[in-house]
Amino acid sequence: MFGHDQPGGSPFGPGGFQGVNISIDDLFGGGIESIFSQIFSGGGTRRRSRGTDLLVNHEIPFQTVFDGSDESIEIDVLKECEDCEGTGSPTSEGVKECPTCDGRGRIQRIEKAGFFTKQVVSDCSTCRGDGRIVSDPCGACNGEGRSKKTKQVTFTVPAGISSGTRLRMRGHGEAPRGAGGESGDLYIQIEVNQHPWFERDGADLLMALPVGFVELALGTQVIIPHPDGEDLRIKIPAGSNPGDTINLPGRGLPGGRRGRGSVTVLLKLDMPKKVSRSLRKSLDSLKDEIGTDFDKLEDSIRDEAQRRRRS
């Protein structure tokens, strides 16, 4: 679990931005009375605290991107102490208003910066921004008002989800310190496991298909399983070349702008790792028919370049 670097948390501490308010009242005749009215107006109210957001990673199989699913995880999280009901003390007399900040949880001071006046706000160091002092701490939570609990969280993973997506579960983060306030949020970051042969590009799927020279020359049909439950039928035209692509629209992932994406198949020449004597003899006999005509090599190179530029 993470601290205020998490989504929804604050890099400036539990109180949010501990910044400065620059007043130019002095330049326009507001005077010192205007400055003190800014400090003490509404200063008696204790700010509403908020628990820390949490971030967890959750892996899903590639199949879930097609189907979507209901998932559940267990997390250890700081929740309100049941013994003291989040107050930090078993009795009401055991919790008192912080005398340093008068229960506000914040300290304000005025600083001069040239012609300007800065109103600096920071957490009270005595009560750590809580606005209360626990003199009789709860034995179960040591006065924190929170204790670790194991919690099961159920959530829905929508079809078409991609790695890095964060699902937000409101109120499932840590409870705030002290009674009152609201719990933080839980962010579940999804990581999709790789498919054995498909690569993903948005809603489209890409794959390489190794086939032999005979299949490229004569054409064939290849049938492979597909995550959507229906076999993928890839028709390879006769005379295909390594590097050619075959597009199958509507067989990609759900969630595209126009429905499901496409599957793009890249044809690769599957060369034998070892050539037997009989195969070598057969290939030698076919060299004149299917081998490279080096006398016309430059013409072939030009034709290939023009074909590539047109495509």
Image (cartoon, rainbow, N blue to C red):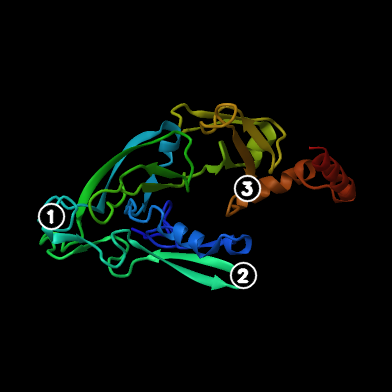
* Circle 1 or circle 3, nearest the eye: 1
Toward which corner of the image does residue 26 lie, by quadrant?
A: bottom right
- CA gap, disc 1 and disc 3: 92 Å
Toward which corner of the image does residue 109 lie, by quadrant?
A: bottom left
- CA gap, disc 1 and disc 2: 47 Å
Image quadrant holding the C terminus, namely top right
**For the residue labelled by badge 1, is the local secondary structure a helix, a strand or a loop?**
helix
- CA gap, disc 3 and disc 2: 92 Å
Residue 106 placement (x, y as % from top left): 36, 62
Structural crowding at the residue carrying mark 3, measured as other residues with C-alpha within 10 Å and reported as few (<14), some (14–19) or many (≥20): few
Please tell me which of labels 1 and 3 falls first in the chain.
Answer: 1
Residue position marked by numbered label 1 in the rendering = 92
Residue 60 placement (x, y as % from top left): 38, 44
Q: Three-letter amino acid code at disc 2?
A: Phe
Q: Which mark is residue 279?
A: 3
**For the residue labelled by badge 2, is the local secondary structure a helix, a strand or a loop?**
loop
Q: Three-letter amino acid code at disc 3?
A: Leu
Left/right placement of residue 195 relative to residue 150 reads right
* Circle 1 or circle 2, nearest the eye: 2
Q: Is residue 236 above or below residue 182?
A: above
Left/right placement of residue 64 relative to residue 175 reads right
Depth check, front residue: 114 or 203? 114
Residue ID at (55%, 42%)? 200
Residue position marked by numbered label 2 in the rendering = 115
**For the residue labelled by badge 3, is the local secondary structure a helix, a strand or a loop?**
helix
Structural crowding at the residue carrying mark 1, measured as other residues with C-alpha within 10 Å and reported as few (<14), some (14–19) or many (≥20): few
Please tell me which of labels 1 and 2 falls first in the chain.
Answer: 1
